[in-house]
Structures are given as structure tokens and as C-alpha cells.
Image (spheres, rainbow, N blue to C red):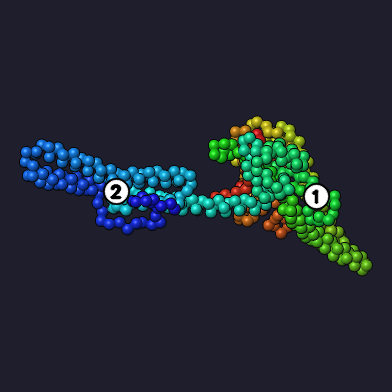
């Protein structure tokens, strides 16, 4: 901190001041002292020079006036120095320097002002230190995140790039100051096209394999997610680009999915093939013994297990080979009549009079899966219901039951393929419904109902 002379200067803490006197008290005492001095001098000089009373009075008045001005100037000089020092510290605060403080030795109103000013400086200093620490922490996090981050100004210049962005786009070299177009000239055409397209999305680019640097010309598809956001910074528009490398994560998810598929298929095959093999051995022994009266029963059981296995395989095939929907105008009454011919449910509210465009076979499959799940939820058959409601330019289909509902853990995984809480379930019912609805440009939502039960909502274009 800098040091000022006389009463104004820098301090680290509150000074020790004497007895308190206000500014007005000091001025009153000064005026009283000058008045008493003038009276005493005038009395003494008039007694000594009785014939010069007017001259003596005039001289004393002039002397007191000069002395008063001098004393007043001395008092105001310290105050003016304080004001100039205070102005200097305010300018320092504006420049972000909070290391200066003020010192005032007198105990008056200005001392209170100095203490308040110093307290403000201490608060600003602490806030600035806290802000610097937060900025340091944030910068460390941004620099070390695996997500490549680019901040682009409205003129296209890169104003911030973290380590991941430098490594991905410029071999670890600095990117700040370059334009985005200059940087894109050094990357793959796929990345240029993804950025030029605008919006968020996934893209894959053939990059040299990183796992084995010794293998030359070994290329593999690297998958990235591009996200971009626009916002105002310091009154100017900026764009934030985020590039996240998803290859390893997607591969782990792919492996987990395949493991889950293999477990489900293995379980179902064992449940069907093991009894079939056992029944076949039994039939063979019965034939050897000439006891064929039980063969029709055994063959019927084998047929039933074979048909179940065929149905199981067909379910997987339908999910894997779901064709693109063939949209055509379909009346809701026709669709509801078809559904009621296959399963029981209560229709709530009137149906839309206007026909909707969808693939009737796929929509029937999706709704039948949902209605089947509703009946298997433990709900009474007469409490399974369906409603169709128009919402502006959308349609909402609700399939509801009064079963046990879903826990948060089950609901978060219910739409994942091959996930099932049923011992004999394939985990494809809700997943297939989701695929069909999303192929129609809609979305599916799950929610527990008040009073128990589940509601599956389908939001579709009208």
C-alpha cells in the first residue's frame, strides 16, 4: 500500500484516535479563540494608545481576518487532501486494484467516512479474491474437461479454446485469435459439414486409430456429438461449440447391449430347448418300449415350445427390421374398433373426427403392446382405458391402468430394449412402441397416476 503524508495515508487496520470532536465543534472553538484574542488585543492597545482607538480596532480586525483565513485554510487543506486521496482510491477500485486504504487521525465525521470507505475496500478486495479463485477453478475445469470447447465471437474469431479443442483441431497448438474458417481448413470434411449444417447432432469421422500407433493406415470411425449455443457476452453475440468424443462410451454401451441380448436369448433358448430335448429322450424311450400312448401329448408339448420359440424370435426380428412407416389417412374409429377386437379396454372421451396420417399396422402393434402391458400390470380389466385428445397441432394418446405403477429405477430403464422386470418378458414391448412412435415423429412418456397405476402418453403430429 502507498503512504500519504500528514493525516491522509494507507492503513492496514482501524487507527487509534483521541477524544471525538465534530467539525462544527472545531470551527466554533476556532472562532471563539479568535474572538477572545481580538478582544484582549484591542483592550490592551486601546489603553496604551487611547487616541488611536479606531486605527487599533481596524488593525486588530485585519489581523484577525488574516489569522482566521490562515487557520481555516490549514483545516481545509487536510480535508481537501483526504478528498483527493479518496478520489484516487475510487479510481483504483475502478481499475480492479483494491490494495489502497485511507487514514484520518482525527475523531470526527470524516473519520466515519474514512472507516466506511476502508470497509468497502476490504469487502471489494475479499470479493475480488474470491472471484479470482472461482475463475481459476473454472478455468482449470474447462481446460481439463475431455469435451472440446470453442468460443466464437460474432466476427468468427476464436476467443477461447481449451486443451481438448487444441488437440483435436490444431495438434495442441493455440487457437485463440484465429478465425473458425481458418481452423476448419485443417480438419476433415465431415466435421466442416457438421458445423456448416448448424444445430446439434452426431457425426462420425474416419481418424487414424489411437489404440495402436504402430499400425499404419489403420482407420476407424470416431463418433462425436456436436452441440452449439448462442448467447450474449459483454453486449456482443458469441457462439459456444462443444465437441464430445463418444466412440468409447458408445462401444461400452454396445457391448452391454449385446451382453444383455445374449443373456435374454440364451435364457429363452434354454427354457425351450432343454424341455424339448428331455421330451425327445422320453419319446425315444417310449418308442423303444412300444408304449406310444403318450406320444401325442409329448409331441404337442414339443410343438407348443417350438411355437413359443418361433414367436420369441419373430419379436426380435420385428424390432430389428422395423420398416419406415407408410403414412396414410386413417380414421380413429377404424383403429379403435380393430384394437377392441383384440383386447379389452375402456375408451374415455370422444374420438377426433378428423383422420390422422400413420401406418395403421405399426400403430396397432404399438397400442396393443401398451394395452397388453396394462393388463399384465395387475390392474383390473375394466380399469384399463385409452383416450385420444387433440392438442393444437398435436395428438395425445393415453393408455392408463390401475396396476402397481413403476418405481423410479424401473421407469428410467423401461424404454431401454431388452429391459424387463417379468421373468418371461423379452423387454421389447415398450421399446418397440417407442421405435414406432418416434418413427412417426412423436415421443412417448411414462408417469405414475395418482391413486396408483401407470399412464403411458404418446404425443404425435396431428
Mark 1 residue element: strand
Residue 208 location (% of width, % of height): 80, 49
Judged left or right of residue 75, residue 41 is left
Q: Nearer the viewer, mark 2 or mark 1?
A: 2
Residue 364 appearing in the image: no
- Label ID, residue 109: 2
Depicted 258 relative to depicted 38: above or below:
below
The reply, left or right, for residue 103 in relation to residue 218 is left
Q: Residue at x 53, y 54 (%)?
A: 133
From the viewer's perspective, tell me whether residue 211 is left or right of residue 281.
Answer: left
Q: What residue occupies the far bottom of the structure in this picture?
A: 289
- Total count of labels: 2
Measured Cα–Cα span from mark 2 to mark 1:
75 Å
* Mark 1 nearby-residue class (10 Å; few <14, some 14–19, many ≥20): some
Looking at the rendered structure, the secondary structure element under dot 2 is: helix
Does residue 273 appear anywhere in the picture?
yes
Residue 208's tag is: 1
Along the line of sight, which residue is nearer the eye, 5 or 403?
Answer: 5
Side (left or right) of 331 relative to 106? right
Looking at the image, which residue is at 88% across and 65% down? 281
Amino acid at each position: 500500500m502507498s503512504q500519504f503524508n500528514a493525516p491522509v495515508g494507507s492503513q492496514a487496520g482501524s487507527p487509534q484516535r483521541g477524544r471525538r470532536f465534530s467539525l462544527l465543534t472545531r470551527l466554533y472553538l476556532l472562532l471563539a479563540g479568535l474572538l477572545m484574542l481580538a478582544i484582549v488585543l484591542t483592550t490592551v492597545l486601546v489603553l496604551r494608545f487611547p487616541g488611536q482607538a479606531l486605527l487599533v480596532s481596524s488593525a486588530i480586525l485585519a489581523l484577525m481576518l488574516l489569522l482566521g483565513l490562515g487557520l481555516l485554510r490549514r483545516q481545509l487543506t487536510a480535508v481537501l487532501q483526504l478528498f483527493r486521496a479518496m478520489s484516487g482510491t475510487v479510481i483504483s477500485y475502478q481499475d480492479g486494484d483494491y490494495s489502497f486504504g485511507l487514514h484520518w487521525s482525527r475523531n470526527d465525521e470524516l473519520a466515519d467516512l474514512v472507516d466506511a470507505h476502508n470497509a468497502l475496500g476490504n469487502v471489494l478486495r475479499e470479493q475480488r479474491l474470491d472471484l479470482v479463485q472461482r475463475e481459476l477453478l473454472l478455468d482449470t475445469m474447462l481446460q481439463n474437461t475431455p469435451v472440446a470447447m470453442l468460443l466464437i465471437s460474432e466476427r468468427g474469431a476464436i476467443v477461447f479454446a481449451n486443451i481438448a479443442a487444441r488437440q483435436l483441431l490444431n495438434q495442441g497448438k493455440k487457437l485463440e485469435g484465429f478465425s473458425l474458417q481458418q481452423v476448419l481448413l485443417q480438419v476433415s470434411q465431415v466435421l466442416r459439414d457438421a458445423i456448416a449444417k448448424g444445430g446439434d447432432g452426431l457425426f462420425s469421422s474416419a481418424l487414424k486409430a489411437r489404440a495402436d500407433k504402430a499400425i499404419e493406415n489403420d482407420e476407424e470411425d470416431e463418433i462425436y456429438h456436436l452441440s452449439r449455443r448462442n448467447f450474449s457476452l459483454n453486449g456482443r453475440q458469441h457462439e459456444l461449440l462443444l465437441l464430445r468424443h463418444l466412440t468409447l462410451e458408445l462401444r461400452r454401451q454396445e457391448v452391454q447391449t449385446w451382453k444383455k441380448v445374449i443373456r435374454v436369448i440364451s435364457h429363452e433358448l434354454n427354457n425351450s430347448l432343454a424341455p424339448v430335448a428331455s421330451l425327445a429322450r422320453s419319446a425315444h424311450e417310449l418308442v423303444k418300449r412300444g408304449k406310444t400312448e403318450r406320444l401325442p401329448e409329448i409331441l404337442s408339448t414339443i410343438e407348443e415350445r417350438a411355437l413359443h420359440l418361433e414367436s420369441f424370435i419373430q419379436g426380435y426380428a420385428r424390432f430389428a427390421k422395423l420398416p419406415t412407416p407408410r403414412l396414410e389417412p386413417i380414421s380413429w374409429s377404424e383403429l379403435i374398433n380393430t384394437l377392441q377386437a383384440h383386447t379389452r379396454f375402456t375408451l374415455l372421451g370422444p374420438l377426433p373426427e378428423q383422420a390422422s396420417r400413420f401406418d395403421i399396422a405399426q400403430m396397432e402393434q404399438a397400442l396393443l403392446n401398451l394395452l397388453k402391458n396394462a393388463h399384465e400390470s395387475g390392474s383390473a380389466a375394466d380399469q384399463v382405458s385409452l383416450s385420444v385428445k387433440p392438442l393444437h397441432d398435436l395428438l395425445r394418446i393415453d393408455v392408463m391402468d390401475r396396476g402397481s405403477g413403476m418405481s423410479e429405477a424401473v421407469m428410467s430403464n423401461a424404454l431401454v430394449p431388452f429391459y424387463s422386470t417379468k421373468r418371461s418378458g423379452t423387454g421389447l414391448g415398450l421399446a418397440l412402441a417407442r421405435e414406432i412412435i418416434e418413427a412417426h415423429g412423436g415421443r412417448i412418456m411414462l408417469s405414475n397416476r395418482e391413486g396408483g397405476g401407470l399412464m403411458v402418453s404418446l404425443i404425435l403430429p396431428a
